[in-house]
Image (spheres, rainbow, N blue to C red):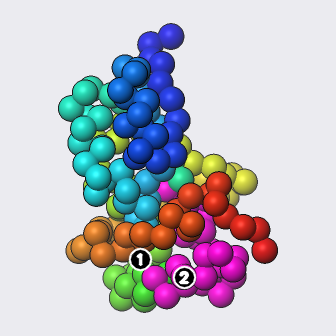
């Protein structure tokens, strides 16, 4: 085994764990709408410590791939952002998925991304989008602040 690390959920949890442990790998959530680890400086800090960084939840557990009118009740606040993202995608002759991939590709400190899929077709779409990634001019403006939306453990199923 070459590395040992952990999977975290919040910046605060990560800070607490790093006070006691010295992992060489951390997996954490990050997406175009969930930029907490970026804006807090935690990604840069972990990178300076030579911790391998693996991103997960780059689609926010699938919410960022949903049709705006099919979002669950707890995530309806994302609807307007998704409609706007789709508009930008059409104007740029690309897809929402290509923008989501462009965001994670722009985080140079990331060593890997971890995704969940339900079919080979999904995997092929993701790989294609990876190779056709598009970059938005202002990633920061897409950041969602509502922790009840960003943290799946707080989701109320409806």
In the rendered structure, does residue 63 fall within the stretch colored magenta?
A: yes
Give the x, y percent position of residue 153: 65, 54
Which label number is shown at residue 77? 2
Above-or-below relation of 84 to 99: below
Q: Is 88 positioned to the left or the right of 69 in the image? A: left
* Residue 125 position by quadrant: bottom right
Question: Which is nearer the eye, 146 or 72?
Answer: 146
Q: Residues within 10 Å of mark 1 (few under 14, many from 20)?
A: some
Above-or-below relation of 15 to 90: above
Q: Nearer the viewer, mark 1 or mark 2?
A: 2
Q: Where is mark 1, residue-wise? A: 94
Give the x, y percent position of residue 59: 53, 61
Q: Residue at x 33, y 68 (%)?
A: 134
How many numbered badges does the structure rendering display? 2
Q: Quadrant of the C terminus?
A: bottom right
Q: Secondary structure at mark 1?
A: loop
Overall secondary structure of the magenta section: helix
Q: Earlier in the sequence, mark 1 or mark 2?
A: 2
For the residues labelled 1 and 2, say whether their Cβ atoms are less than 8 Å apart: no
Give the x, y percent position of residue 36: 37, 56
Q: Secondary structure at mark 2?
A: helix
In the rendered structure, does residue 122 fall within the stretch colored magenta?
A: no
Above-or-below relation of 29 to 48: below
The residue most toward the right is 158
Q: Residue at x 29, y 52 (%)?
A: 40
Which label number is shown at residue 18? none
Q: Residue at x 60, y 82 (%)?
A: 76
Question: Which is nearer the eye, 61 or 146?
Answer: 146
Question: Which is nearer the eye, 122 or 36?
Answer: 36
Q: Residue at x 61, y 53 (%)?
A: 123
The residue stretch that appears in magenta: 58-81
Above-or-below relation of 134 to 153: below
């Amino acid at each position: 085994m070459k590395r040992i690390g952990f999977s975290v959920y919040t910046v605060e949890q990560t800070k607490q764990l790093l006070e006691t442990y010295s992992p060489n790998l951390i997996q954490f959530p990050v997406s175009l709408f969930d930029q907490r680890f970026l804006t807090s400086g935690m990604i840069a800090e972990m990178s300076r410590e030579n911790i391998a960084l693996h991103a997960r939840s780059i689609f926010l557990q699938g919410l960022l791939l949903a049709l705006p009118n099919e979002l669950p009740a707890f995530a309806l606040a994302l609807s307007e952002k998704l409609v706007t993202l789709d508009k930008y995608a059409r104007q740029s002759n690309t897809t929402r998925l290509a923008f989501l991939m462009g965001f994670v590709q722009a985080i140079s400190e990331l060593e890997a991304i971890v995704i969940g899929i339900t079919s080979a077709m999904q995997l092929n779409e993701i790989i294609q989008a990876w190779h056709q990634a598009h970059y938005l001019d202002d990633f920061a403006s897409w950041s969602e602040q509502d922790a009840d939306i960003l943290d799946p453990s707080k989701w109320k199923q409806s």
